[in-house]
Image (cartoon, helix red, strand yellow):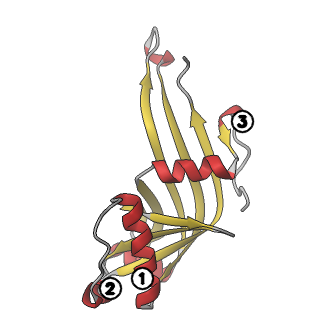
Amino acid sequence: MKNGHRPMRRQKREVTSPEELRRILEKCQILRIGAMDEEGMFVVPVNYGFEWEDELLLYFHSAKEGRKADAFRKDPNVAFELDCGYEVITGDYACSYSAAYESIMGNGTVTLLETPEKKERALTLLMKHAAPGANLVFRPEMLEAAAVYCLRVSSLTGKRRERKQ
């Protein structure tokens, strides 16, 4: 997967290892998706699941109608962000404060999953990530009612700011 972004200003904070990027994906809980429609740009937070074999695929669900669904139908190209591990790093004066965190940002294309089998696989991955140990029984009417999406990641960049010990 390529890093389609400009070079990071503080390259020492860049996370490039696939293993470390996977760890951040496992640790974070909320995926923020940026999209565009006739009303302008907007960001929506969603729970997610993922798989990363040859490519990174992020899965999330939604209602079948609404701004998000309309936007994805008109333009499936999106940006995304997730972050975790936020902790304030105190300083001696206001501008010397900072924050520790880990994050991933990127771009990709959203597609609606159509078959019950694909929806169930995606929702299983989502539930295993968001609520490990949850009952993973999906009734057919539930699968029919839900819009389940796959965000196929085309580029990403990871970043980490660690707390000094």
Q: Residues within 10 Å of mark 2 (few under 14, many from 20)?
A: some
Q: Residues within 10 Å of mark 1 (few under 14, many from 20)?
A: many
Residue furthest to the top in view is 92
Residue with the mark numbered 3: 11
Q: Secondary structure at mark 1?
A: helix
Q: Residue 49 or 2: which is nearer the viewer? A: 49
Residue with the mark numbered 2: 143
Q: Amino acid at mark 3?
A: Gln
**Left or right: where 76 falls relative to 61:** right
* Residue 112 % position (x, y): 46, 83
State whether residue 140 is above or below residue 165.
below
Nearest-to-viewer mark from 3 and 2: 2
* Residue 28 % position (x, y): 45, 49
Q: Amino acid at mark 2?
A: Leu
State whether residue 71 is above or below residue 10.
below
Q: Secondary structure at mark 2?
A: helix
Residue with the mark numbered 1: 119
Q: Residue at x 70, y 41 (%)?
A: 8
Disc 2 to disc 1: CB gap under 8 Å: yes
> Can residue 44 be seen?
no
Q: Quadrant of the C terminus?
A: top right
Which numbered circle lies on residue 141? none
> Can residue 20 be seen?
yes
Q: Amino acid at mark 1?
A: Lys
Q: Residue at x 48, y 18 (%)?
A: 95
Q: Earlier in the sequence, mark 3 or mark 2?
A: 3
Q: Residue at x 39, y 69 (%)?
A: 39
**Left or right: where 92 falls relative to 3:** left
